[in-house]
Amino acid sequence: MTESSFRHIGPLTGIIDKAARKKQRRSLPLGFLLIVLLPTAIAAIYYLLIATPRYVVESRFIVRAPDKSQPSSLGVALQGVGITNGQAETFAVHEYIVSRGGLRDLESRQNVREIFGSRGADFFSRYPRPWENEGREGLFKAYKRFVDVGYDSTTGISTLKVEAFRAQDARAMAVALLSGSEDLVNRLNIRAERDAVADATLARQEAQSRVASVQQRLTAYRNREGYIDPALAAKEGSELIGSLLTTIATLEAERRQIASETPQNPQLGSIDSRIAAYRRQVETERAKLTGSNASLAPRISAYEDLVSEREIAEIELRQSTASLLTAQQDARRQRVYLDQIVVPDLPDRPLEPKRWFAILTVLMSSLLVYGVGWLIWAGVKEHRQT
């Protein structure tokens, strides 16, 4: 090849190199295509052409107690871990809604598998998804995707959010979950009330048993001794002795008067006999009251012990009854209630998925990943050149 030929080829090679570099600058890098455009295109195809619309039902409720100054039994138990009164019952309801127990109760009211596995739904949204099984674990994962609950600490209002492929199904599930939550609150109230009055009820039963036991022993004593009230019998005996002594004093005064007027009066013997008889009667009545084990004195002592024991038992019974009534009233004041602020309503149109927002999210995330990767690659390349 001649020197003139080389002179012609040189400029042509330069032109070709410049064209190639210009074309390279105009074409997109392979990494950009794979990291940014491909995921965005897939997301656009899925959300715009495949994704099944989902209806969303929201309900707002509050769990409250009539008397906030006194925490409930559950609130007292959870205050020790930093949860204030009112929040304890609310969080208990939240945990129930997103738990397996909540799913189990929902299954008793609705055909959850049919709702989540609607035939018209896309394979990425319905139950089970391609990589999930059809067992309880897969159903529970799907349940957590379709049901969510949140809490506003400022207002104390909770928000229940339920999604479904049909508006009727979403509303039915929301109603069933709220009904189950109300049942849970009622069970908590019953359990707390039972625990609160258990001690007072036991104390009252023990007091009733003591009163019944003392009354039985008192009845057995009366049947055995033959006295309804030995103290009353002693009182009547004392009154009889007093009457006899009065009669004796009267007869003695009468005898002195007769003896002073007519010492040989034949009535003196009769009066003496009557006085002697009355004195014997007095001794007999006194012997009934005191002086031996058969007298009323030891019987009165045993009777008064039983009566005192019965009075103490009755006082304890009245006090335990008052304590039980107070405990029941306190338990009623501490009951909590679930009030629905916004009831579940039938949605007019599907709100999920937010298609353009999801596509934009994928695009921005891909750009962020690509940008970070490009900076790392540029730093590594520059380090190698140095």
Image: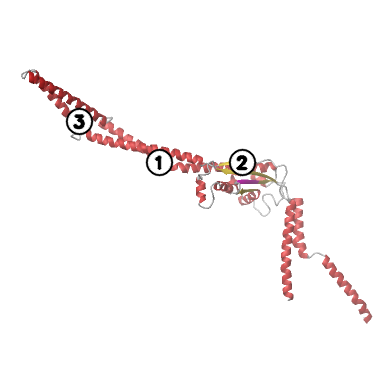
Q: Nearer the viewer, residue 229 or 256?
A: 256
Mark sitting earlier along the chain (1/2): 1
Where does label 3 land, which residue?
288
| Coordinates of residue 126 in the picture (x, y in percent) | 69, 49
| Mark 2 residue type | Gln
* Residue 346, picture quadrant: top right
* Residue 233, picture quadrant: top left
Where does label 2 land, which residue?
340
Report if the CB atoms under discs 3 and 1 are less than 8 Å apart: no
| Coordinates of residue 108 in the picture (x, y in percent) | 60, 42
Query: Looking at the image, can residue 109 be seen?
Result: no
| Mark 1 residue type | Ala
Marks 3 and 1, how far apart at CA? 42 Å
Residue plotted at (73% across, 75% down):
384
Res. 269 mark: none
- Please say if 179 is above or below 261: below
Where does label 1 land, which residue?
203
